[in-house]
Amino acid sequence: MKTAFLLATALLLAPMAARAADDHAPLRFVLIPKTVHPWFDKVNTGAQAAADLLGKTTGRKVEIEYRAPETADVSSQNDIIERAIATHPDGLILDLLDEKGNHATMLEAVDEKVPMTVFDSLPPEGMDITAVGADFCEQGTIAAQRLAGLIGEKGEVAIMIGVPTAPNHTRRAECERATFAKYPQIKVVATGIDNDSIETAQKQASAIMQAHPDLAGWVACDAAGPVGIGQAIRESGRTGKVREVGLDNLNDMIQLIRDGVADSSASSRPEMQGYWAVIAAWQRALGQKTPKYIDTGIDVLTRKNI
Amino acid sequence: MSLETTFPTTPPTPPRLPPLRRLAARCMRNPLGGVIAALVLIFGVSCLLSPHFLTGFNMMIMARALAFIGLVTIGQSILMILGELDLSVGAIGGLAGITGGMLMVQAGLNPWLSLVLCLLLGTACGMLNGVLITQLRLHSLVLTIGMAGVYGGAILVATKGVAITGVPVDISFLGRGLVYGVPVPFIVLLACLGVVAFVMVRTPVGRYVYAIGSNPEAARMLGLRVDAIRIAAFATAGFLSALAGILMVARLGTAQPSIGDTWVLAPIAAAVIGGVATTGGLGSPVGAVLGAVIIGIIENIIVLFGISPYWQSVVSGGIVVLAISFDSLARRYLHREA
């Protein structure tokens, strides 16, 4: 019985031991976003590009395992992170839903000696982890300021909040409100909640425009919201009358700008975030020091530059 | 032409079943046989397929993740045996967690007292569900959909969607602690399961629950206090959800408004896999928790294998449907053979 147990244990541990002994084994990074979403697919695209580049230039393959929680819920994300830690990857690349709620799980990664890099979010205080991303507040501010300019700094505007429990969405909303507050003749007359759903955003935007016929413009706080708003503007025949500045660079958003329904979009650069997160994780895996923050910047997408 | 009738002198021996069918028959005779057989199979396959599966760390995280969903599953399984459903259990867990965070952080109340108040709140929410269902003669499915909106909306009204941070570390042991390597939430789950299983098997109340679930009108005619038992069952489900909610707050160190969002369908699926009949009167909380273990292993192995997130739902949902279908077909087949 004892021999059988030892044999079974040896068989189970053999692949791990072989992997550890081989310095030329592929480097394996697990990329865990907030949830399943097209924006994170773009992050993954950038991450895969960086992995391909590193593999070709260094001769050592880099593998990215993309594992998204089905829902944007901290406990679900923690479960995914913990299960990823159990596989002892060479690095974790995380978009934290809430740095405080994720903290205990991240400490487990530290205990298991799995290096981490975060993107699109900030690490918990006191943890020496590189953060890659753009400033949410700056993104919201850019969108609100651009809309203020488009409507001549006066009139009624509305804000579409994404998921009210998502810190990045609420932060953008706060900064958009603060920006509009600087213009005495601009009034925020309505706030919708779309829960990151294009369909919900479309319904909410249609209802709000019915209730506020003098509405001059829209900003949003997530990637799905501005697409739904654009559809609502088009359906109501108010293209050009109600102005919209969107967020991010989903294909539908870009099409709305091309069609003239939306003016522009304040877009973080998801591909670049994925790319630089992998570069930072790779450096960490090799034991190199990495910068505290890598700012990938914000693009203002217009008909001229898309 | 003469008719010759012969009578056997010894009773005929039943035909010997093939080994696999014999095993299936043995499993099906035991109410927990099917789920235990499936669990052993899935566990064994997982051990063979992934070298990371049987590690101490992985077992620990699986046990901890099971604790939260397991507590909710116990409550939901009692209701399902009773022929009811509560779709607001997740929202009750979230509301209790948020209230706990507010009492501890914003009101500065003693963390342990806050914990007790949260459990009372969860129990009261469950009881309210039960009272409305029994007094207004509403279907539990319909009412609890509405109440899920009420409790979930109350969370957003109270928090504006923002997590409550700064939860005292006094209670963190409840969510993060280990006793001889076993997570504390898992120990809480085992304790609750032990109490509920005892009540369901060894006390008259448990027998009443099965009787009402099998035939509520007959139970009423026998003089059982059907409404009181229904209300008590909803209150128990509320209590267990609140316990899961407050343990999650202790685990995360913050009170997240999203706590409980994923606690609605998984416990129902777990209970069904564990042999609890959706029509009531059959099954056990122990089987339901074993069903939750199966779901937990499936979710774990999906991540260990690195299956695409877009396939995760298809795979886990498909396995659940397969398990339920297999169980149903096996029962029908064996019933026909008998």
Image (cartoon, coloured by chain):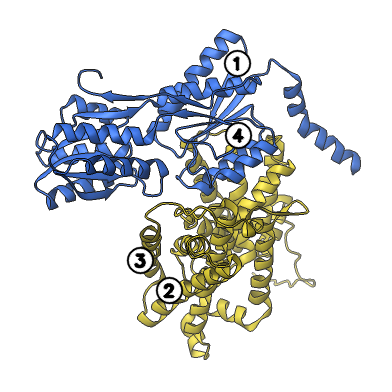
Chain colours: A blue, B yellow
Residue for badge 1: A61
Whether residue A250 is situated above or below residue B209 in the rendered picture: above
> Which of the two discs, 4 and 1, sits closer to the camera?
1
> Which of the two discs, 4 and 2, sits closer to the camera?
2
Asked whether disc 2 touches disc 1, contact meaning CB atoms under 8 Å apart, the reply is no
Chain to which the residue tagged by mark 3 belongs: B
**Picture coordinates of residue A45 (x, y %)?**
44, 23
Q: Please tell me the numbered disc located at residue B129.
A: 2
**Looking at the picture, which amino acid does disc 4 mark?**
Phe
Residue at 15%, 28% in the rendered image: A260
Element at label 3 = helix
Q: Nearer the viewer, residue B8 or A221?
A: A221
Asked whether disc 4 touches disc 3, contact meaning CB atoms under 8 Å apart, the reply is no
Q: Please tell me the numbered disc located at residue B305.
A: 4
Q: Earlier in the sequence, mark 4 or mark 2?
A: 2
Asked whether disc 4 touches disc 1, contact meaning CB atoms under 8 Å apart, the reply is no
